[in-house]
Image (tube, helix red, strand yellow):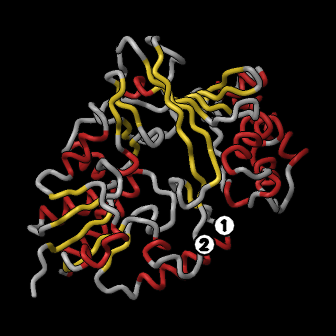
């Protein structure tokens, strides 16, 4: 008996929206459901004081892949925003990522050779041959001054653990540039959708039936019976009713303020790297789109412990959680008519271009075989 829909897509974030778009383009009938009261997942923008506020944290699109850049620009034009965050630590502002501007601000070094010698000397003094934790790893990569000024307290806020208790693999490398270049991502293509990310999602989902405020798990049997196949983008352990255990995350709390100022901090992103502030950064949203509004909206980001009532933001990919995920992944491969995709279903941190690439890849394989 033919089902009403070819695909039920659980979750309207980037993975679900791209998959739905590709399936719809191929003539498939899709239904998207989302438990939130809006579409777009974590890229959703909320309009406050005529400013597009990134409701779930700053989202800056960047990629070196021209095909992906062309793909997103077919739905909405992207501006030329370049991410160049600042770090506030020990009462001073510094440029990020670590580059010649940062080293001059920190040490007064004026040439790449001087900065390199300073870092090499500190690595020789404080580094260890086989780092056993994040602290030792960072000291071995950049030395004491950069570690203590920018990494130690910020990381401890982010993860809620001492740096000496965190695994070394969290910091595989620390990009250090010996040029005066504050371009954080350094990718060829960067920008923000003109008018906000909702325009991208609206473009992807044009002509596709969508329902919000729907809890899939409360009516799972009903929704499963509507479609021939399911695209699931939620937490993989929740799909299996946590039967093997709960995968862990770090969460975030966002505190918005609307200010009667044209310009609060002069930059979209300012990180607060030391422990004197509980938050890790302040976002001033209007600067993503070069706004001129009379007011401004800022968001302070507070890392927090995750529980099943909080939003899951960063998977804790330590040995325990990764082993547990692999067990869930084995279970997922036994589900013949379910496609698992996205950061929660794959338990990995994805940048936007990566999740779009993953959705394009999986939808191509699925639609070719269908």
Nearest the viewer among 355 and 195 is 195
Q: Residues within 10 Å of mark 2 (few under 14, many from 20)?
A: some
Nearest the viewer among 312 and 104 is 312
Report if the CB atoms under discs 2 and 1 are less than 8 Å apart: yes
Q: Secondary structure at mark 1?
A: loop
Q: Position of residue 115 (x, y in %)?
A: 75, 31
Kindly identify the residue that appears in the image at 67 percent across and 73 percent down: 320
- Which residue in the structure is indicated by mark 1? 318
Nearest the viewer among 257 and 286 is 257
Q: Is residue 182 visible in this depiction of the protein?
A: no
Q: Is residue 186 left or right of residue 250?
A: left
Q: Position of residue 313 (x, y in %)?
A: 52, 53
Q: Is residue 287 left or right of residue 305?
A: left
Q: Quadrant of the C terminus?
A: bottom left
Above or below residue 124? Residue 117 is: above
Kindly identify the residue that appears in the image at 50 percent across and 25 percent down: 257
Q: Is residue 96 visible in this depiction of the protein?
A: yes
Kindly identify the residue that appears in the image at 39 percent across and 42 percent down: 61
Gap between marks 2 and 1 measured at Cα: 6 Å
Q: Secondary structure at mark 2?
A: helix
Nearest the viewer among 153 and 63 is 153
Quarter-wise, where is residue 168 in the image?
A: bottom right
Above or below residue 290? Residue 241 is: below
- Which residue in the structure is indicated by mark 2? 322
């Amino acid at each position: 008996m033919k089902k009403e829909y070819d695909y039920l897509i659980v979750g309207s974030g980037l993975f679900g929206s791209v998959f739905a778009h590709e399936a719809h383009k191929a003539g498939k009938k899709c239904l998207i459901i989302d438990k939130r009261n809006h579409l777009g997942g974590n890229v959703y923008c909320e309009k406050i004081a005529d400013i597009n506020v990134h409701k779930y944290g700053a989202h800056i699109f960047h990629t070196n892949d021209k095909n992906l850049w062309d793909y997103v620009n077919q739905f909405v034009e992207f501006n030329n925003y370049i991410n160049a965050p600042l770090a506030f630590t020990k009462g001073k502002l510094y440029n990020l990522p670590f580059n010649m501007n940062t080293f001059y601000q920190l040490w007064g070094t004026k040439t790449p050779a001087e900065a390199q010698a300073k870092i090499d000397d500190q690595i020789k003094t404080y580094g260890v041959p086989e780092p056993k934790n994040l602290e030792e790893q960072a000291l071995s990569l950049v030395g004491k001054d950069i570690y203590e000024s920018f990494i130690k307290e910020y990381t401890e806020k982010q993860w809620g653990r001492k740096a000496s208790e965190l695994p070394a693999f969290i910091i595989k490398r620390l990009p250090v540039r010996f040029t005066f270049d504050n371009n954080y991502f350094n990718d060829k293509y960067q920008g923000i959708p003109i008018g906000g990310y909702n325009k991208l999602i609206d473009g992807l989902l044009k002509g596709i039936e969508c329902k919000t405020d729907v809890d899939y798990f409360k009516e799972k049997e009903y929704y499963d019976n509507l479609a021939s196949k399911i695209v699931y983008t939620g937490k993989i352990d929740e799909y299996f009713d946590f039967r093997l255990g709960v995968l862990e995350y770090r969460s975030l709390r966002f505190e918005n303020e609307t200010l009667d100022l044209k310009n609060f901090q002069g930059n979209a992103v300012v990180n607060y790297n030391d422990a004197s502030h509980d938050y890790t950064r302040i976002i001033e949203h209007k600067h993503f789109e070069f706004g001129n509004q009379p007011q401004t909206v800022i968001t302070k980001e507070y890392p927090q412990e995750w529980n099943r009532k909080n939003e899951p933001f960063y998977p804790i990919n330590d040995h325990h959680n990764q082993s547990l995920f692999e067990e869930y992944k084995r279970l997922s491969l036994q589900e013949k008519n379910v496609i698992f995709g996205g950061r929660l279903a794959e338990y990995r941190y994805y940048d936007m271009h990566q999740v779009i690439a993953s959705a394009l890849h999986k939808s191509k394989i699925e639609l070719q075989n269908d």
